Image (cartoon, rainbow, N blue to C red):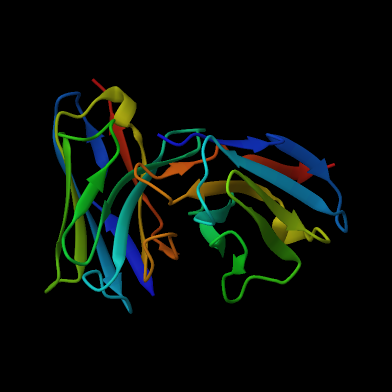
Amino acid sequence: DIQMTQSPSSVSASVGDRVSITCRASEGVSNYLAWYQQKPGKAPQLLIYLASTLKSGVPSRISGSGSGTEFTLTISSLQPEDFATYYCQQAYSFPFTFGPGTKVDVK
Amino acid sequence: VQLVETGGGLIQPGGSLRLSCAASGFSVGGNYMNWVRQAPGRGLDWVSTIYGDGSSFYSDSVKGRFAVSRDDSKNTLFLEMNSLRVEDTAIYYCAGGSSWSHFDNWGQGTPVTVSS
């Protein structure tokens, strides 16, 4: 199984800050990597797929990059609605696996 | 697009439960459909995927105990869960989309608690 790790596990930030989250796969997943945002008590929402393609309607301050084993989610200027937990997910092979999550909270 | 899960509840270990995911504005049979769960205070855990051609895939932790299916006439996805264990306690989400590589649309989830 492909193991996914994320760093940091949590980050405290302020509105306007630039935040980057790293996701690493235990083996190459090409660009079959998606990012989700989840707020407390809510279902996850897709942000980015195929490593760097922004889902329609997702603000352009959010971006994704990477390929192979290392990926990055970047929020260029954090907004109040961005405080949430973020998960990466590989779809290169079954079983699909998620990273453990990165919580972005208020500094 | 709306996905609505039902069927969760409290069940004793060893019991069975059937979850449903009714779709509107979205074709269950024409898309890739998945079940993802989240144990209390934990991260996301992929459970199962079913393709349009009926091919299905399972995580090792549920293989042989859970079965995914769908009724295209009712535009509904199902998850039959047998031999339930305490560690199956979670919110179960259905999710799906036009691509197998990511989960575009999610339901609100239905909670399953396995406890004696």
Q: Position of residue A50 (x, y in %)?
A: 53, 62
Q: Residue furthest top?
A: B116
A106 over A82 or under it: above or below: above
Q: Nearer the viewer, residue B7 or A83?
A: A83
Q: Is residue A15 left or right of residue A90?
A: right
Residue B3 in percent (x, y) is at 34, 65
Q: Residue at x 18, y 56 (%)?
A: B55
- Residue A79 falls in image quadrant: bottom right
Farthest bottom residue? B25
Q: Quadrant of the C terminus of chain A?
A: top right
The residue lying toward the viewer, choosing from B95 and A26, is A26
A7 horizontally vs B56: left or right: right
Q: Is residue B63 left or right of residue A58?
A: left
Q: How many marks?
A: 0
Residue B49: image location, x then y, percent: 28, 52
Give the image location of residue A16, x and y in percent. Answer: 88, 58
Q: Residue at x 83, y 46 (%)?
A: A13
**Residue sitting at 72 percent across and 71 percent down?**
A60
Relative to A69, say whether B55 is above or below.
below
Image-quadrant location for residue A66: bottom right
User: Residue A4 versus residue B13: which sits nearer the camera?
Assistant: A4
- Residue B7 vs residue A28: left or right? left
